[in-house]
Amino acid sequence: MAQSLPRSPLAPASFPALPVIGGVRFAAAAAGVKYQGRTDVMLAQLDPGSSVAGVFTRSATRSAPVLDCQSKLGGAPDTGAAILVNSGNSNAFTGHYGQTSVAEITAAVAEATGVPQSRVFTASTGVIGEPLPHDRIVAKIDELKSGLAENRLEDAAEAIMTTDTFAKGATAQVEIDGKTVSIAGIAKGSGMIAPDMATMLVYIFTDAAYEQTALQNLLSGLNDRSFNCITVDSDTSTSDSLLLCATGASGVDATGNAAFADALNTVMLDLAHQVVRDGEGASKFVEVQVTGAASEQDAKIHGLAIANSPLVKTAIAGEDPNWGRVVMAIGKSGAAADRDLLSIWFGDVLVAEKGWVSPDYREEDAAKLMKQNDILIRVDLGLGDGKSTVWTCDLTHQYIEINADYRS
């Protein structure tokens, strides 16, 4: 399905040039999970000594691969690790069949790679409620193993796409103790995107060494400021998975290093924004900044209420500066707000203040801003120091078209 969709108008000009990450190799193949002739499965193999951290959906109906991955985090790094991902079928809501599929795939990967089955992580993305034809994936394991190479991360990014219109990649480098440490990541996500931990698959690799528990803590903290701050349609998937892998191939221990954390945050935010820019049917990228809230938690609640509002999102799609929709979203959020302290901006245009439209507001100024691809909505509650930023996209008729026949 993804191959027939037009490329998002918000897409980057091209896939970035990702550095080779020592200690990990990638392969991709066409297994025919749902579509014939489409690259739909990827394998990554990590050298012994690699640390793996992860965050996953908190959905009560999360998939068999998610449950399996969660149970395996924190394993011994001296054995290496492997990651296998398929698109086309999410292996979710499939009962004991889902567990059988995970067991068959992880056993086949373990046999082919020599990685213990307890260190083989899988993920599946696509339609919910249909048994995964895992035999088609197992049949490709030897081909994937023989195709492993350090420079195939872009191929892996293409293999995990569903309704994505472009492959997503990001990278950063940082100097630590006079040596260069590299980070490179890929993501998939377009629809069913909402914080908890945002609905998508993300795989990030670094050649730094990093102690596993500390790596897990770092990832969880940065996730709350990146992937957990995006939303396309307010729906949280059964299959959200983010794995962060540190191979140690650079010989540099980055545990606790602030510069490394900043670089990783840059990669995570870049990938998170790309997911929003590829929102199903999206024509506008929207940043919602909330300040002056009673707490940071309240600020995020208000921000998500605005970002998830169908009325706000359709107004943006229609390039209509309908600030009343923003007022509505704030009022319904459930977080503290005072009408007579509220201020709203579209870009740098002050729209409303002190419970009323600003006396200097000219709708034509705001309407001009709404024609841009990137839209900024700012809100100040006037209640305290709480602040938060979330990112979303508009809601267009194409979103309906894509999701009305997703299983067709």
Image: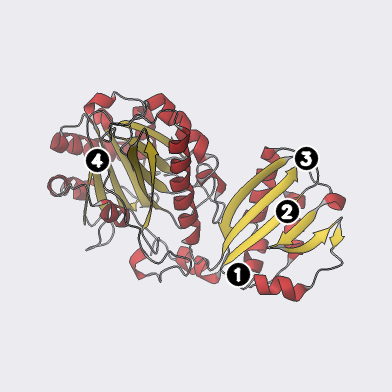
Q: Which residue is mark 1?
A: 317
**Circle 3 is placed at which residue position?**
384
Horizontal relation, residue 202 to residue 97: left or right: right
Q: Given contact means CB atoms under 8 Å apart, are the residues at marks 2 and 3 in contact?
A: no
Kind of residue sitting beneath label 4: Gly
Q: Is residue 31 above or below residue 209?
A: below
Mark 2 sits on what residue?
A: 379
Sort mark 2 into few (<14), some (14-19) or many (20+) by Cα contacts within 10 Å: many
Front tag of 4 and 1? 4
Rendered image quadrant of residue 387: top right
Q: Position of residue 172 (x, y in %)?
A: 39, 47
| Vertical comparison of 351 with 170: above or below | below
Going from N to C along the chain, the mark reached first, 4 or 1, is: 4
SS assignment at label 2: strand
Q: Sequence-wise, which precedes: disc 1 or disc 2?
A: 1
Residue at image position (46%, 37%) is 259
Q: State yes or no: discs 4 and 1 in contact (Cβ < 8 Å).
A: no
Which residue does the image show at 23% across and 57% down from the upper left?
32
Q: Which mark is first along the chain, 3 or 2?
A: 2
Q: Is residue 279 visible?
A: no
Distance of label 1 from label 3 (alpha carbons): 32 Å
Residue 22 has which mark?
4
For this view, does 132 lie left or right of residue 213? Answer: left
- Image quadrant where one finds the N terminus: bottom left
User: Which callout, 1 or 3, points to the residue nearer the camera?
Assistant: 3
Residue 236 can be seen, yes or no: yes
What is the distance, in whole Å, between disc 3 and disc 4 at their CAs?
Answer: 47 Å
Question: Where's residue 249, x and y in %?
Answer: 26, 35
Q: Earlier in the sequence, mark 1 or mark 3?
A: 1
- Element assignment for label 3: loop
Q: Is residue 77 left or right of residue 353?
A: left
